[in-house]
Amino acid sequence: MGQRLLLLVTTCLWAISCAVPHHASSRDGLLRINLNKRSLTHESLAAAKAARQHGALRLKSGNSDSDIVPLVDYLNTQYYGVIGLGTPSQNFTVIFDTGSSNLWVPSSKCYFSIACYLHPKYRSSRSTTYKADGENCKITYGSGAISGFFSNDNVLVGDLVVKNQKFIEATRETSVSFILGKFDGILGLGYPDISVGKAPPVWLSMQEQKLLADDVFSFWLNRDSDALSGGELVFGGMDPHHYKGNHTYVPVSRKGYWQFNMGDLLIDGHSTGFCAKGCAAIVDSGTSLLAGPTAIVAQVNHAIGAEGIISTECKEVVSQYGEMILEMLIAQTQPQKVCSQIGLCLFDGTQSVSNGIESVVGKENVGSDLMCTACEMAVVWIENQLRENKTKELILQYANQLCERLPSPNGESTVSCHEMSKMPNLAFAIANKTFVLTPEQYIVKLEQSGQTVCISGFMAFDIPPPRGPLWILGDVFMGGYHTVFDFGKDRIGFAESA
């Protein structure tokens, strides 16, 4: 197969209806696979969330474990296309997910999972290019898992044939989202470092077989709710009609996920403090919202008037220790040591050994860890307000207000749809440039009982050092900025979407 650009029209889990794919070559010679879509509903959002709670994602191959960064909402908003497996081709609708690296589909040997009876199944006996492998494997998610065994066969992506691709035949699918989802399997686009069984990602096989004009793939996500097309995934290049101006590139800082180093999050140009000295970030097409440190998300929710859970522990810390924290910061106590000196946190000398902020929003644990977490957030908020030269009364009042804006346990925070025009612009500092998101871009609208409900596009997600703090830039960000994944030069590029 000669080198060429390959485009796949993609759409979302919450915005897709089953349709027979229509392949058509446009006038620029690029192949497009068209999908339909439907409106996002609260029910479909809730159903998708069942597949991924606020827990760590761990991958298992055989008996070995590999520690990796937890992911959020793995099966919430996803992007779909149709691929073929085997000769002749057996079609499957798959998620194109930059947050994982394996390809898997249901197997004809899946007998005891309901999901397998609701989706097409790969039948190796019907393929003349099938090659047995047989190695067992398992992928565990927050509320379910898939397990099966490896096989090898040709994969048809558009009109590109990737030969002898190693993939997983899933024989058990235990998550409810595999039953409710419109997808059959997942096509991972992450680095091979996080691939179960050392199976090469499809893009790596394309590169090795010299099927691509350039060693990149790019996403354009169409956020126009009235448009039939959900966007395009381009292998081997990028479509200039998808973006404006030039791309800003950042190097991949850690292979596995598409991870890079970013700076501050700004609210109407003002620093939120927590990532002022830098944070790690991951670009993930398999995450619907923007997931980041609770200390920042609470500030965002406060600025946009989002309603979240009221944390008694947080308000208790501010009430009992707020003035002490303020005085210690004024006295130049190192912020990371304030909570240990107060006695709310334990430190190993340089960093906390608490369980992290996720206990505030994702678990029902109480006690020292929760108080430590609340203290750590209060230090960030109070220090940030000191930079603004606010009075003691205003600083403590602000901290109390942020306690009331902590996200709800499932990560969602609602806002008034009528107040969007009054909400601030938010901006991510990346490569010494600011990437602005307007309220129209970071507020997600969904349908509930015939009415429109607006939710914040930000959700809390906390990773302790040394892997964190960490941002996950999902579809809300990728919708605003055309994203290039350059695996030839190990870099990521962003440009304003057209």
Image (cartoon, rainbow, N blue to C red):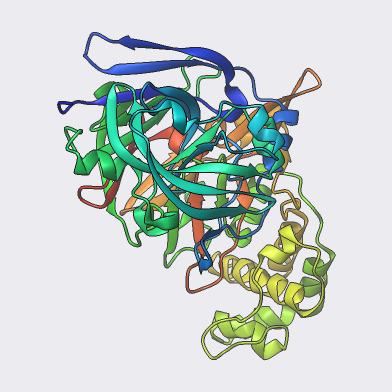
- Which residue corresponds to the image point at 50% horizontal and 26% vertical from the top-left? 93
Q: Which quadrant holds the C terminus?
A: top left
Q: Where, quadrant-wise, is the N terminus in this rendering? A: top left
Q: How many marks?
A: 0
* Rendered location of residue 431, percent (x, y): 31, 53
x 70%, y 51%: residue = 143
From the top left corner, tell me how far across and down residue 154 is, in percent: 33, 33
Asked if one can make out residue 226 in the rendered structure from this viewpoint, the answer is no
Left or right: 231 with respect to 143? left
Res 13 → quadrant? top right
Residue at 56 percent across and 37 percent down: it is 442
Splitting the image into 4 quarters, where does residue 81 fall?
top left
Looking at this view, name the residue that lies furthest to the front.
Answer: 125
**Along the line of sight, which residue is nearer the eye, 388 or 142?**
142
The residue nearer to you, when weighing 61 against 368, is: 61
439 or 332: nearer the eye?
439
Residue 136, given in percent of the width and then of the height, sits at 51, 54
Judge left or right: residue 318 versus residue 391: right
Asked whether residue 484 appears in the rendered view, the answer is: yes
> Does 132 sit above or below residue 323?
above
260 sits left or right of 328 in the view: left
Query: Residue 59, image x and y in percent?
Result: 53, 58
Q: Is residue 272 left or right of residue 362?
A: left
